[in-house]
Image (cartoon, rainbow, N blue to C red):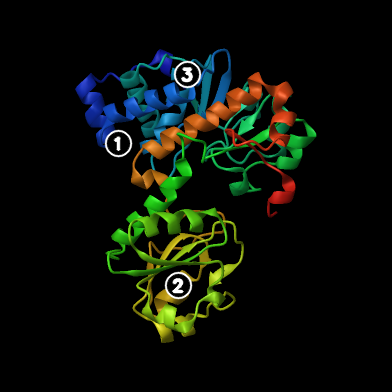
């Protein structure tokens, strides 16, 4: 297991060199990214003074999380990483060091390429981000009893395989969702803009286009609201069996945006058979934002699917980072704020969550989650 302390290392790059390096790795305007981080810290009044944060070190827009924690005063930031299809661990370390130097983050970030329970045992706030997962029973058993796990998503988006919720409850460790509709934050609203971007990339002009959405959760409502405000002829359905043949035959695009649904939506066992869709409208483009569809079968029937590829339930084909770094910065800063509140006001958590107010914290309840 490799370990790197940013306090022991320097990126060795001047300001201009740092900017160019980050631009080469997917951050178009690094100085704007630093500004977005500082704006989010100011808005949320994030103060992690005295706490140890365990999170991930990642690449591109996702490089920000340990930097946010360090800039908000965390005593120690333990960031986990590994080689991935996005970047090597060495490259992630270089990006983190470079953004840390550019932003003025203190040298309290350490990056580890292992997933040792010993590291989790030292943390007060543990995020559920990619290189930190899975947070299984063995990992939970190693945690401090005072630790908290804030989710960088809403409570209803929780994926059981990411965190062993039963083990956390057995040890009294809170697992808390982040209210993405919190006034002034409103991160979930970016979902509508992401769908609009996907439509454009699939060469659906939107203007004069007919768009159908299938969704039984929040994604569909947010997307419909945004597209309607843009003047798009759009209809939202919770089930494709509700759509009549004329609507299907006239549509330019069908947006599948059902994150929480476990079964196949379009396919032999889904709401809509492949041969029926091909018969009614072979010129239709299926936009797969979230939800399971038979992409191979659709393609074999001559129907265009964008972006294509297999997609499991409770996954998005594209993340909000496709729009730019702001959604990532705001959501991850808000998730860390959830962790801060949970630590500082732990004795108030039961009453606060029971009140069900529209604050930043959300309770993750087992009865609300599909296992």
**Which mark is nearer the camera, 1 or 3?**
3
Q: CA distance from mark 2 to mark 1?
A: 33 Å
* Residue position marked by numbered label 3 in the rendering: 72
Q: Residues within 10 Å of mark 3 (few under 14, many from 20)?
A: many
Residue 340 placement: quadrant: top right
What is the x, y in percent for residue 75? 53, 14
For residue 282, above or below residue 332 = below
State the image coordinates of residue 360 (x, y, percent, origin top left).
57, 33
User: In percent of the image, x 46 and y 40: which residue is there?
Assistant: 186
Q: Is residue 72 above or below residue 96?
A: above
Examine the rendering and report whether any part of residue 144 can be seen: no
Which residue is the extreme one toward the right?
170
Q: Earlier in the sequence, mark 1 or mark 3?
A: 1
Q: Residue furthest left?
A: 16
Which structural element holds mark 1?
Answer: loop
Q: Are marks 1 and 3 in contact (CB under 8 Å)?
A: no
User: Mark 3 falls on what kind of element?
Assistant: loop
* Picture residue at 66% right of the left edge, 48% below the top: 160
| Mark 2 vs mark 1: in front | 1
Q: First in sequence: mark 3 or mark 2? A: 3
Residue that badge 2 annotates:
296
Q: Report the label total.
A: 3
Front residue (pair 107, 235): 235
Q: Is residue 61 visible?
A: yes
What is the distance, in whole Å, between disc 1 and disc 3 at their CAs?
22 Å
| Disc sitting over residue 27 in the figure | 1
Specify few, some or many for label 1: CA neighbours under 10 Å numbering under 14, 14-19, or 20 or more: many
């Amino acid at each position: 297991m490799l370990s790197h302390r940013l306090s022991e290392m320097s990126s060795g790059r001047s300001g201009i060199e740092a900017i160019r390096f980050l631009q080469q790795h997917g951050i178009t305007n690094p100085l704007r990214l630093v500004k977005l981080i500082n704006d989010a810290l100011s808005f949320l009044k994030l103060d992690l003074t005295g706490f140890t944060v365990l999170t991930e070190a990642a690449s591109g827009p996702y490089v920000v999380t340990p930097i946010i924690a360090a800039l908000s005063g965390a005593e120690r930031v333990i960031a986990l990483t590994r080689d991935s299809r996005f970047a090597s661990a060495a490259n992630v370390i270089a990006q983190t060091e470079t953004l840390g130097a550019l932003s003025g983050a203190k040298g309290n970030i350490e990056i580890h390429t292992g997933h040792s329970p010993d590291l989790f045992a030292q943390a007060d706030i543990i995020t559920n981000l990619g290189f930190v997962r899975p947070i299984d029973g063995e990992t939970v058993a190693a945690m401090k009893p005072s630790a908290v796990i804030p989710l960088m998503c809403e409570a209803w988006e929780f994926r059981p395989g990411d965190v062993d919720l039963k083990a956390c409850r057995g040890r009294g460790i809170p697992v808390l969702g982040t209210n993405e509709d919190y006034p002034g934050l409103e991160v979930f609203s970016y979902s509508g803009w992401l769908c609009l971007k996907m439509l454009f990339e699939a060469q659906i002009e939107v203007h004069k286009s007919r768009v159908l959405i299938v969704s039984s959760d929040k994604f569909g409502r947010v997307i419909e609201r945004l597209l309607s405000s843009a003047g798009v002829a759009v209809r939202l359905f919770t089930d494709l069996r509700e759509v009549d043949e004329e609507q299907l035959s006239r549509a330019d695009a069908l947006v599948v945006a059902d994150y929480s649904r476990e079964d196949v939506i379009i396919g032999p066992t889904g709401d809509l058979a492949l041969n029926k869709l091909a018969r009614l409208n072979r010129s239709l483009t299926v936009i797969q934002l979230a939800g399971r569809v038979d992409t191979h079968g659709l393609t074999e029937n001559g129907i265009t699917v964008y972006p294509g590829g297999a997609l499991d339930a409770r996954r998005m084909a594209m993340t909000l980072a496709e729009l730019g770094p702001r959604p990532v910065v705001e959501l991850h800063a808000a998730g860390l704020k959830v962790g801060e509140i949970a630590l500082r006001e732990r004795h108030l958590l039961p009453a606060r969550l029971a009140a069900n107010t529209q604050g930043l914290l959300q309770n993750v309840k087992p009865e609300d989650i599909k296992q």
